[in-house]
Amino acid sequence: MGDILFLAHRIPYPPDRGDKIRGFHILKYLSTKKRVHLIAFADDPKDLKRKGGLARYTGNRSIIWRAKSQTMAAIQALLSHRPVSLTAFDNQQLRASVENILQRHAIDTIYVFSSQMAQYVPARLRQKVIMDFVDMDSAKFAAYSQTSKGPMGWMLGREARLLLAHEKATAKHADANIFVSEAEAELFRERTGAERVMVIENGIDTEQYDPSASFKRIDTMGRPIVFTGQMDYRPNIEGVTWFVETILPHIRVDHPDARFVIVGRNPTEAVKALAKHPGVTVTGEVADVRGWLAAAAVVVAPLKLARGIQNKVLEGMAMARPVVASAAAAQGIEHGDTIRVGSTVGEIATAVSQLLSDPKKAAELGAAARRQVQERYSWEARLSGLDAILGIKPSGRRTAA
């Protein structure tokens, strides 16, 4: 039985953002089955120094700095008639690393994490290929294009079309095409006609995300309404902007002490500017989001556009906090009515206000949410479906090195 080559568009360590969390737990799980070799990009200088954190789960680790600018990637995409999503991750050093690993080790499975990395799968395959699309990226760009005008709208529409063609071709040659939710999987089947489409949902580490765990507590004033996420990611930017400009004012009519706290790294200038609004705080990167989640009177996920299962929702639930999510952010999560879901400004504002008005009810809802994720979303349970895809019996476990 051979080894696994794990290709990732971003080093899955530390597991401190959505894609890295999923990537880390899948890599960790695979390492209990076979020896895993990792080849991944890094786009944060700090991550280049952190690969040692994956030593116990991997054999060889090759982490390559991704320095190409978005402008250069766009120029290359236009000249080559390829999606920017691919040219941005086109790197000769990484390609050489893949060839080297395949020559030196008996690899029988290539696990490709995100469609950008499919370009590194050899044309003449001897290995099983597991393609983890996570979400359907072409659908995301198609949605962006509908709300953008001029050259940007044209560029986003072009990206959606070319990326859809890439997704179709990739799925055709993969042994398994994995998505994070049934909604994403069904959308992919409809738009591509692909076969061998499967679902491996995200989970949550309920021992780490536990209100009774050891972490630094946050002393706050007022009643924090907390949002967590990567704050240079467009859906997050649009979500917090919508909340600050249209939802929060309604909440503060009844609850003038309510504060909206935006927690997450790399806030754009547009996000930083939101702190000028009454009752809004932008923290930037924090060492541990659990402190802010534990301090939250309500956790919110007001995303207009969301693909797959949102870790920020699962984290809020696991921390036993009352969660209010948009319909888009709640999609795919089996929450069992333990969170509040709204589609409009009025519905979301009302849900948050009601929870702020009734702390006892809010606490009961949060406790029920934690029980739900404990029962439904442990990583071990979510990833057990990989055994059949790998062709391994559930009892066939290997101790990580």
Image: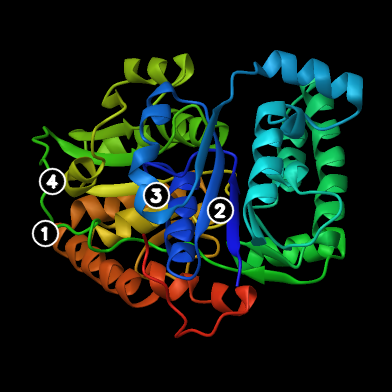
Expressed as whole percent of the image width and height from the top left, the position of residue 240 reads 44, 33
Q: Are marks 3 and 1 in contact (CB under 8 Å)?
A: no
In which quadrant is the N terminus drawn? bottom right
Residue annotated with mark 4: 215
Badge 2 element: helix
Residue 257, given in percent of the width and then of the height, sits at 17, 34
As measured in the structure, the alpha-carbon distance from the residue carrying label 2 to the one carrying label 1 is: 30 Å
Left or right: 376 with respect to 169?
Answer: left
Q: CA distance from mark 3 to mark 2?
A: 13 Å
The CA span between labels 3 and 1 is 19 Å
In primary-sequence order, the first of circles 3 and 2 is 3
Binning the other alpha carbons within 10 Å of mark 3 as few (below 14), some (14 to 19) or many (20 upward) gives many
Quadrant in the rendering for residue 385: bottom right
**Residue 243 x %, y %:** 43, 35
Circle 3 residue: 312
User: For residue 328, which numbered disc appears in the image?
Assistant: 2
Q: Is residue 183 above or below residue 304?
A: below
